[in-house]
Image (cartoon, grey):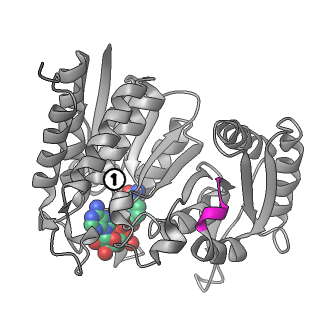
Amino acid sequence: MKKKIIILPGDGIGKEVTAEGKRVLEKIAEIFDHTFEFEEAVIGHDAIESTGQSLPDETLSKLRNCDAILFGAVGHPKYDNDPTLKVRPEQGLLKMRKELGLYANLRPIRLFDELLESSSIKAEILRGADILFFRELTGDVYFGEKGRKDDGRTAYDVMIYHRYEIERIAHKAFQAACTRKRKVTSVDKANVLESSRLWRETVQEISKQYADVTLEHLFVDSAAMKLIQNPRSFDVILTGNLFGDILTDEASQIAGSMGMLASASVGDTVGLYEPIHGSAHDITGKGIANPLASILSVALLLDISFGLKEEADTVIKAVEQTLKAGFRTVDIANPKTVKEKIVNTQTMGNCVLKQLSMINEPISQ
Ligand code: NAD
């Protein structure tokens, strides 16, 4: 198979983890005899510094002409500490999602048995949890009207949803549930918000087309509590942009660390694959970032954009074997376990590459 992949490292640890994701793609191409052509592009703080735009036109045109995108993260302390700056790295990310029509963000919460003890949640509560989030990505307060009035002393962000936006992601969530445990939990705040009442009404109507899928509704506050109390009770969670943003960070603790969670953003054109974490200024340049979320994003890319299920499963298996062999970056290290070997970002990448080679070595006669 011949495919063109754009590598969009972005800022901070985005660069460090995406380098490892790319090496895994190269290895998969070598093992399975594919041709992956790579091209890099800039976004975020680096792009602002070099072009004045957080998503330069040149980057956008490259993204429109490829088969898949592997993205890192955007963000820089300069902007976090100065809310008055008008051109901001995250604008590039939001524009990219909007321009490419990436309306559905899939976030699988995959818990590797080897990390059961690394989570801050008790192992007996976590064991067997397997959740797939569908977070809507192109609506909500992120894209509603926003502004200031009264000489800047009052600010507003409008929470807005159109029916078609809810319908298209609801279909994706129900379709996914049909291949899993056939349960969709729709999360909203319909007791307070009108946009949530439209959300609930629309999801209820769509559910009639999926009679063998059970639909439950939860208010976001209750969902936040139940995620930690009983994560096993969920299968597919369908929710809006803001609630999904918050709940998936919370759910990262089910997987042990932010550094373990991959995501896919899809719509009707090219797919974008990225870890759920940000640019993590606190650890940038230290070489300690966990690259597994980026590597697991590669597995999603292979599966969803290229339909290469065997290759995707091989990447997941290699990550599992790496963890079984005891290799850990600091974020997933368990201080109680002496058998673990603490490694840096690049060494973790090397371990996964080694496992990929071993999984695919012909068994000697
Ligand atoms: P963050 O996700 O960058 O970091 C949160 C915490 O998790 C930090 O302590 C960090 O060290 C840790 N962490 C994150 N990824 C890790 C990894 N791979 N390995 C080990 N530890 C990891 O969130 P934040 O600190 O709130 O934000 C930092 C910057 O990232 C901000 O500028 C923010 O705007 C940006 N951000 C970008 C995205 C994105 O590009 N998709 C998402 C969230 C935040």
Q: Quadrant of ligand 1?
A: bottom left
> Seen from this angle, which residue lies furthest front?
365
User: Residue 39 at what x, y percent from top left?
Assistant: 23, 29
Q: How many marks?
A: 1
Q: Residue at x 38, y 59 (%)?
A: 113
The image quarter in which residue 241 lies: bottom right
Q: Is residue 277 above or below residue 17?
A: below
Residue stretch in magenta: 231-235
Crowdedness near tag 1: few (<14), some (14–19) or many (≥20) residues, C-alpha within 10 Å: many
Is 232 part of what is drawn in magenta?
yes
User: Residue 223 at what x, y percent from top left?
Assistant: 68, 71
Q: Is residue 294 above or below residue 187?
A: above
Q: Residue at x 41, y 57 (%)?
A: 276
> Seen from this angle, which residue lies furthest bottom?
153
Residue on which the image places disc 1: 293
Q: Residue at x 45, y 27 (%)?
A: 305
Give the secondary structure at mark 1.
helix
Is 362 part of what is drawn in magenta?
no
Q: Is residue 65 visible?
A: yes
Report if the beta carbon of the residue with label 1 is closer than 8 angstroms to ligand 1: yes
Pick the residue in front: 12 or 216. 216
Q: Quadrant of the N terminus?
A: top left
The image quarter in which residue 360 lies: top left
Question: Taken as a whole, is the magenta stretch helix, strand or loop?
Answer: helix
User: Residue 240 at what x, y percent from top left?
Assistant: 66, 57
Q: Is residue 85 visible?
A: no
User: Residue 201 at what x, y percent from top left?
Assistant: 88, 53
Please name the amino acid that badge 1 sits on: Ala
Q: Quadrant of the C terminus?
A: top left
